[in-house]
Amino acid sequence: MSSKKNNIKAFFNALPKNIFSGFVVSLIALPLGLGLAMASEAPPISGIIAAVVGGVVVSLFGGSHVTIAGPGNGLVGVLLVAITTLGLESAYAAIICSGILLATLGFLRMGKLADFFPSSAIQGMLAAIGLIILGKQFHIMLAHKIKREDTIDYLIEIPYTINDAIHYDKTGLIYAAIAGVLSLIIMVLYPRIRNKYLQLIPAPMWIVILSIGFSYYFELVAHETNPISSLYMISGIPEFKEIVAQLPTVDFGKVITFPFWSSVLALTLIASIESLLSIKAVDKLDPEKRRSNVNLDLKALGLATIGSGFLGGLNVVTVIARSSVNVNNNASNRSSNFFHATFLVIFIVLFSTQLTRIPLPALMAILVFTGYKLASPTSIRRIFSIGKEQVIIFLGTLFVTLKVGLITGILSGVLVTFLIHIVINKSISLFLRNVLKPNVLMYQEQDNGNYYVSVKHFCSFLNFYRLKEKLDAVPENRDVIIDFSLCEFVDHTVMENLNNYRELFIKRDGHFDVIGLDLHDSDSQHPFALRRLLPVPSIIKSGLTRRQNNIEELAKNYTLTYDSKKEKETYFLDKFHFFRTKSIHHIYNKLSTKNSVLSVFDIEFSEGEFIAKETVRTTMLHITLDEKIPEFTLDREGFLEKVYAFAGFKDIPIQEHSDFNNRFYLLGEDEVAIKTLFNNDIIHFFESNPYYHIESNGNSLLIFSKERLASIKEVKALFDFGKRLKQVFSE
Amino acid sequence: MSIKPFNTIGIGVTFSPNLKANIYEAARLSQMLKARLVLIHVGDKSPDKEALFYSILEPFTKSELEVEIVFQPGDPVDVILSTSEEKQIDLLILGALQREKFLKYYVGSIARKITRKAKCSILLLINPSVERIPCKHIVVNGLKDPKTEQTIASAFYVANSLKAKKVTIVEEITQDELAIKVEDDKSLRKANIIKERISLRENARVKAIIEDIPEAHTKHISIKSQPIFGKKGYSIGHYAQISRADLLVMNSPSKMTFWDRLFPHDIEHILTELPTDVLIIQ
């Protein structure tokens, strides 16, 4: 009971800052809502209706915490097609149907739907949407309304429009174009100006305030009519009373036609992808580190879309830009989404006549900037840096989306990606044979509670959901180790998603390490590049893995030397008993102190020969000692198989240390010397530190713990253990 | 708990490059388990063949291994199955095939048919060798199944005979048992509590099984139990592979219908992708 009371108290305490952030978000949502609706050729108010319905419904029934719902950028292209081909009244019916589908996806727990699309294809699709928005609105921004069949034509005509704009002779058009250009300049420069008063109001709202102020100036001070042509002013903002009184008619007459359902599917697909991507991105921003329930959110978004459609609004999706503003303004729970809707209602009730004073080009400048952001050259350059094949996927999706449509575009992206994967691996059977296999194994290691995940065969967008399902079941404050050494192929989508997980885990005090990729090949230096296991590992490797980069950074931070190359000269290890029955291939990723007394390295060795050969990769620590000590092997009691080469020797008991004797196995030939070596200090050291397998060959020590590669955290722990052990031994 | 020892071991032999290795493995195993060895050759009897088999077996017959060679022409599956019944074979050894280029093994069509129909235990060998490779680590399934008790007992019996040092009992827990989908923090917390509870319960169950096994079979072996959450039958193979087990011991499949082959589960996964040597206890 008391915890419930506390919750209510905390909710009320957090209310003021949520009201404030809701207010700031509504300042952006107002112009964006109007603009997005107009770009889709819907009545401007429909965007606001979507935001209001979304804000209320999703805040009440949703499963995420600090997201904002409203009309989305991604949907502009689809809505435009829906409205132009079906007509507005049938488009509302399509919106309602897509809401039903979206809610169904939520009920079917299809929140993982977005995982099945390769990330470069999604990027390509988003860039195409950006270009669609930018291409269409650019002309309006320069007061040059044109109508073309194809979206590409709009882009091609941009230079002509610029040329026309320079040569305008009507003042009405010139002022309209100036308003557009000035607004664009505000959008571009706003993030660069760091002034806390200026930043209090978001850039789109500045544009709204300035243009309304401008219009009032002419009316009240200069007593002239507004010089901006009335063709380029927002028209048809109804009074609040009218919105409530005149619900639009929804026409379900076209439900049996093909274009209707293709619009419904496109709306559902884009709405779910945009929402899921946004929710995932916002979760990373959440200062309270909560996990959103995406399926619950999908249900709420679906419900909101249905309501919005009946009230004459657009689709409701989760939007990333507004949500991040929300987080930046210290929103802490869903109530800010609710207040954003409330403020929008207040604006419409109080200022609906003032809104008609906003020039259209100014509003469209906001959208041009949004479109540019989606298709910005930096994101394209990033794709180029990841690899050539990603560029093909990206551009392929982009062009098909522009030329044919969104659904065809994203499907072609999926197909191209799959074909490229087949070509890269020169094998289709790798995918066909293994795609249905449950290739991910996760278990908690019994000795330290780490989650160990091993992935077999291949891991790409086709089966990433299996890995994701496992990773989602791990609390983010724990340690996860993902081992790809049995996996022949890992694609870019997986690498990028794993990086997202990594960031999430690090933010929430967990650890997330990827191992076993050091032997895979990639063609670019980028950490997200796809990786393929080579039958014969190449000597010169292109690009370090993240683990290698991390070791390199570790080396820098602790002034150690790091060498990622394979070293074949491993004679210094031959004298250890452990390697008597094993043959060492090479050591790599060597991290050592300047005087190379201590060195940690990954090692590949094999047990047995020929057909019985088993290759093992593990991480070991080697310490050169200053003086001679007896040969011995020390291990945890029970781990017999590591020391079976010593068979025939008995555990050496150390007197008066029964705990040590119970927990450790100490083996060696020279029992007397070993007993003198293991004095109280050394025994106390071993008793109070984690278990490692420790072996002495007289001159040096070899220390390791697992028969797999160590994660960065484990490398650090191992190194530290070695350092302290050396100290204890030299005392 | 009664342990059914393997008294008669059978192996099908053909003239392949692996012949010597196969016979050596079978003979060595028969010696270690103190069993009688039956070589089954699908084909007509001839003095040459018999002489060859005996020459390969010579080092073992010297040390008093009891061997019988059966020659019978016919369909390999039928011959091997009927002979195993006739000769009361308790353990039948079959070889696996290797996919070229990769170190991946699978069970061929004949061996697969035999595995499905056989009434005795089956040992699938991935890489028979003339030299003995010591068997150090055995992984055995700890499924909640009436057959498991027998399987675990047999695993310890084999481990003891082969002088293996470590036995890991893997309890596979399916997603359905978890009965909760992770969606947000609350369901995650719940799921982890349930997982922990299941793990404890499973560990206790396995412990009870081990206590029933004669101490002579368990005292020299370090025992570990590992609950894993994954697909039944497949994940244990994956585990055996990453823990580098030398032998995987499994329950025999309950019943096989056409659908089971189309939608592989349990043992069928292992047959398409052998992680290591596999012993299927009947």
Image (spheres, grey):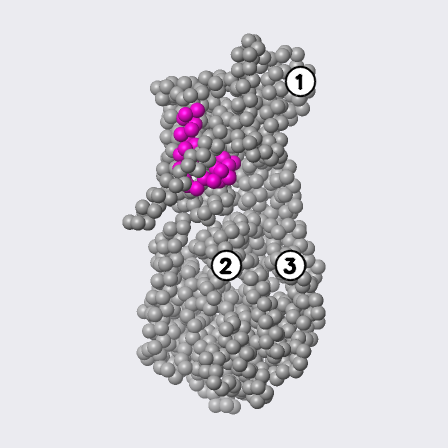
Which residue: 41% across, 70% down? B225
Using the numbered discs, state the Cα–Cα distance from disc 2 to disc 1 in whole angstroms.
59 Å
First in residue order: circle 2 vs circle 3: 2
Relative placement, left or right, of A338 versus A596 is: left
**Looking at this view, is A258 or A375 the one in front?**
A375
Closer to the eye: label 1 or 3: 3
Magenta-span inclusion, residue A61: no
Is A42 rendered above or below residue A678? above
Is A42 rendered above or below residue B26? above
Q: Dot 2 falls on which chain?
A: A
Q: Dot 1 falls on which chain?
A: A
Q: Amino acid at mark 3?
A: Asn
- Disc sitting over residue A164 in the figure: 1
- Disc sitting over residue A557 in the figure: 3
C-beta proximity under 8 Å, tags 2 and 1: no
The segment highlighted magenta reads A319-347
Which residue: 49% across, 53% down? A508
Badge 3 density bin: few <14, some 14–19, many ≥20, Cα 10 Å:
few
Using the numbered discs, state the Cα–Cα distance from disc 1 to disc 3 in whole angstroms.
58 Å
